[in-house]
Image (cartoon, rainbow, N blue to C red):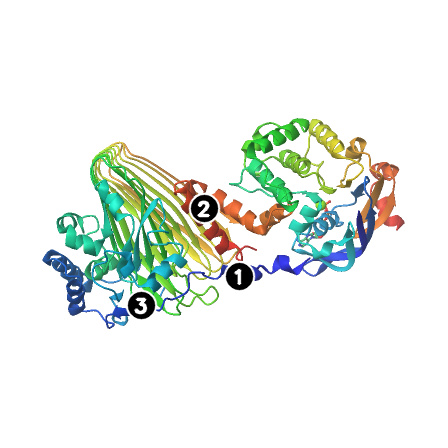
Amino acid sequence: MLEIKDLYAGVDGTEIIKGISLSVKKGEIHAVMGPNGSGKSTLAKILSGHPAYEAMSGEILFDGKNLLDMDAEERSLAGIFMGFQYPVEVPGVNNAEFLRMAHNARRVKAGEEEIDPLDFDDLLSEKMKTLGMEKKYKERNLNDGFSGGEKKKNEILQMAILEPQLSILDETDSGLDIDALRVVSEGVNKLRNENNALILITHYQRLLDYINPDFVHVLSSGKIVKSGDKSLALELESQGYDWVTTVN
Amino acid sequence: MSEEQNSVSDILEDNTYKYGFTTDVESETFAKGLNEEVVRAISKKKNEPKFMLDFRLKAFEKWKTMTAPEWPNVHYPPIDFQDISYYSAPKQKKVLDSLDEVDPEVMRTFEKLGIPLDEQKKLANVAVDAVFDSVSVATTHKKKLMEVGIIFCSISEALQEYPELIEEYLGTVVPVGDNYYAALNSAVFTDGSFVYIPPDTISPMEISTYFRINTEETGQFERTLIICAENSYVSYLEGCTAPQFDTNQLHAAVVELVTLDNAEIKYSTVQNWYAGDKETGKGGIYNFVTKRGKCQGDNSKISWTQVETGSAITWKYPSCLLLGDNTTGEFYSVALTNGHMQADTGTKMIHIGKNTRSSIISKGISADYSSNSYRGQVKVGKNATNARNYSQCDSMLVGDKSSAHTFPYIETANNSVQVEHEAATSKISEDQLFYFESRGISRENAIEAVISGFCKEVFKQLPMEFAVEAQKLLTLKLEDSVG
Ligand SMILES: Nc1ncnc2c1ncn2[C@@H]1O[C@H](COP(=O)(O)OP(=O)(O)OP(=O)(O)O)[C@@H](O)[C@H]1O
Ligand SMILES: [Mg+2]
């Protein structure tokens, strides 16, 4: 589904990603861990098409298509979703309306008619229920004045509405309280199927207790320095990053 | 990342001023220059009653003693008033009883602007007075309005047909010497619209005037007078465009509104004059306008809604004089500046009667190198017991080279008054747009959503079709300024 080949990328001419290759297949869950500033969010932004970040060399294929030729809107419509580490606030734009716009953009792309607003309201209520979210998420403006945890929950609500093929969740777990972490994780698990895939960026083993990764990668200074299975996360938890970054 | 994403300048092509064309019509234009002879000639050309000539001459005498205001936060070289022509009219037979007599080129111009005037195509629910350079060329739905006693015609025609109404009201809201540009307008105005709503009448349709400047060296000085008698209501719309010239054209209008007991006037404007070249700032309209409403009768209401999106320089303060008891004044404004535009706009709410209320909602959007100032005055007289004002002035900055300024003035001479003022500044950022795009929403729809969210309270005041138009217009203007 996703094929990253020897990718070098950065921002403002500074190289941050220094030669990453990664292959993600349908149905897989990949966890990406690594110290602060190692390039995890940069990788997520490159994948989702942030205009400020640029690939210097290498290739990214998504379902065989060259991802680097597509803008953020096209990538989203093609099935890529990024849960932001720091979701931006947009005052004046109602959250439910924003979600409906996003949902309709997909329908229009698929050649379907826009959804009836009342039907969308039903759909939204149902998704919110599975994620244990209160009514205020419909009424308030997009992330406007949301607490850190509320913003993260709202990202997952968007994921639930958009049903992407590939979701990249950038530290969705940080900021969530213990109960919210469990509910959100269960929500993410419910959205999983054999046709979609997940890249989880996290600092904490705790998330991986709920969402079971097939692979764990450690990113350090823009490179994947170690890959393994779930046990790698446990080792990191007990030994810290020094252990892997010095091994290499 | 892909190149198209960044080079929003691609969109620029659609984004150039689409009303920038000129129309080739045979017209009669006065030689440039301004003196008493010119003032007399305009009056004579229009065959005006004596009181009108006296009004003009008095205004001209007054204007000669005045100087251009320097307090607005706008900058431009001094205007050479001798280098402007004060009268230009498409040649046509004298009285326009039927639209067949209007120059077909002029008709086509309005059609191109989305304002079809001929009987078959005219807008069903809006009566339009079309003003081309200095004169009104056509007014639609006149007869239908007349059936309920509503007078809607050009002010030139009103001077012939209803001189007593004009004499009674003209200059009572904006006196001839009110300010420099109002005095100039009072001396040389050539046309505009006149509306009279008789007592106990709700206008069966929207009434509107569409102004079009066509000639390069002609100033447009239009004059609008709307009188709404006891227990009546009218909603009035005004639209404007001008061709693209390298030189600046002066537009100095005066609008006067009067409401008698229990009457209400709702006045909406979408202003899209040519704003000059986006990169160099060359050309564009100087929009120096005096708009004022007088709530003369008790319980009456005047509401101004404006969406200002064009003009090189805007200097405009639609105001309310709350004379009667329990009167209400409202001002809802969206002012967008981009390129090198400069706007100094706002309102004055003068509370004189008891229990008078006013509210001001102003939304300024500044992009590129533009400067956008809100200037508002709330003045409460000593007899205005229990007067109330609420003001909210928000600014939105797009990019980091534009500026926004707020100048609120509050003056109260009465202790029972409640005045509330709120202000906020926000920014539309590349990160916000990326957020939308990363959810599959186009950049255009994203800008539209953010802007319409910001302007919600103002757009809600506009008639439906106008609101949609206004929203599209703002989006189009901002598309290549964000980022
Ligand atoms: N827009 C930018 N401008 C300048 N430097 C940037 C920018 N974005 C990222 N960087 C730099 O690139 C490096 C990697 O940042 P990134 O946000 O990808 O790290 P991260 O692995 O997500 O860290 P964290 O765990 O703290 O979220 C950092 O040194 C950061 O300062
Ligand atoms: Mg990060």
Amino acid type shown at disc 2:
Val
- x and y percentages locating residue B45 in the rendered image: 17, 65
- x and y percentages locating residue A93 in the rendered image: 53, 40
Q: What kind of element bears circle 3?
A: loop
Give me the C-alpha separation between circle 1 and circle 2: 21 Å
Q: Residues within 10 Å of mark 2 (few under 14, many from 20)?
A: few
Label 1 and label 2 in one chain: yes
Q: Earlier in the sequence, mark 3 or mark 2?
A: 3
Q: Nearer the viewer, residue A16 or B161?
A: B161
Give me the C-alpha separation between circle 3 and circle 1: 32 Å
Q: Is residue A150 above or below residue B277?
A: above
Give me the C-alpha separation between circle 3 and circle 2: 38 Å
Q: Which residue is mark 2?
A: B468
Amino acid type shown at disc 1:
Leu
Q: Residues within 10 Å of mark 1 (few under 14, many from 20)?
A: some
- x and y percentages locating residue B195 in the rendered image: 24, 47
Amino acid type shown at disc 3:
Pro
Q: What kind of element bears circle 1?
A: helix
Q: Which residue is mark 1?
A: B12
Q: Is residue B264 visible?
A: no
Label 3 and label 1 in one chain: yes
Label 3 and label 2 in one chain: yes
- x and y percentages locating residue B226 in the rendered image: 24, 46
Q: Point out which mark residue B78 bears.
A: 3
Q: Residues within 10 Å of mark 3 (few under 14, many from 20)?
A: few
Q: Earlier in the sequence, mark 1 or mark 2?
A: 1
